[in-house]
Amino acid sequence: MLNSSFIQQRQSVTPANFDFHCHSIVSDGLLPPHEVARRAAANGVDLWALTDHDDMGGLAVARATAEEVGMNFVNGVEISIEWQGVPIHIVGLGFDAAHPALSGGLDELRLGRSERAKRMGEALADIGIPGVYEGAMCFVTNPSLISRAHFARYLVSIGIARDVPGVFQHYLTPGKPGYVDHRWATLAEAVGWINEAGGVAVVAHPGRYKMSGAQMRQFLGDFKDLGGQGIEVTCGSHSPDHVLHFARLARHFAFHASRGSDFHGPAESYVDLGKLPQLPEDLKPIWRLVR
Ligand code: AMP
Ligand code: MN
Ligand code: MN
Ligand code: MN
């Protein structure tokens, strides 16, 4: 049962600038967690979550540094799932990072990443680009968390494409030669792990998924039925039209709204930490639900 002291622990002071989506070298970001924390604070973020892909290894340092610089912090993670064949990301916020359901689920997801990476190397060798797995490993900062971003950085370094988005476009997206299908977590698993660990599940950057309007509504209905509570409305990859569209869907599904830069590194991101528009004022901000 919720009692008043529990509610007191929820975020009580209205943050001026919350950013609940970004990465460090624990996944495919370019800065260590303490530097991401300091950069967030320097940019005016006053309530922050680090959300590395499928790994919670940066949270302790992130929290300690946030405390040092006087910034409020909540635990975060961005979980890779697949729903009806579409790769989707679910952000978890405010969970107990020691909960075995969540940590065990993420351990398994990371094992799958290593196998996928080897198959990506083989697929690229088949089209005449050898040694890419080994090359990408030189860009990997956490050996248990290999991302397509590391492949992209290596392929740029050997001149295969001019920049990271160019590599994705020609080699690393569905239908392209370096793309390898993979079984990620299910929607039910990701939302279940987050909720069991006492956290809140949020749909990451919904504007990036290749889905029809009807399919998106079906996905959001499934997400809600499984216990999902939030959706990113303002985020680094959303256009002003995306913001309006997903604000409408947030109202329709009675979701709380999140805001996150998806910062990966100074030279590689859509926007810097905290440097994005505020949420539409009538939406319920997700920070009200998280500790
Ligand atoms: P993975 O989790 O290994 O499938 O890799 C996904 C990561 O690659 C994302 O989190 C981004 O960091 C990066 N990424 C995906 N698509 C693109 C793109 N079109 N341009 C640049 N980076 C991308
Ligand atoms: Mn990433
Ligand atoms: Mn993502
Ligand atoms: Mn992300």
Image (cartoon, rainbow, N blue to C red):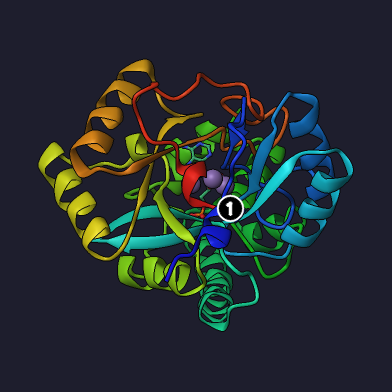
Q: Quadrant of residue 223?
A: bottom left
Q: Nearer the viewer, residue 230 or 87?
A: 230
Residue in the image at 71% along x and 43% along y = 72
Of all residues shown, which one is farthest toward the right?
68
Quadrant where the image shows the N terminus: bottom left
Q: Quadrant of residue 27?
A: bottom right
Residue in the image at 63% along x and 70% along y = 97
Task: Let me know if residue 184 appears in the view.
Answer: no
Of all residues shown, which one is farthest toward the front?
4
Q: Quadrant of residue 55?
A: bottom right
What's the residue type where badge 1 is placed?
Gln
Report the residue marked by disc 1: 8
Residue 160: x %, y % from top left: 60, 38
Residue 229: x %, y % from top left: 35, 52
Packing grade of label 1 (10 A; few <14, some 14-19, many >=20) is: few
Residue 145: x %, y % from top left: 64, 64
- Helix, strand or loop status at disc 1: helix
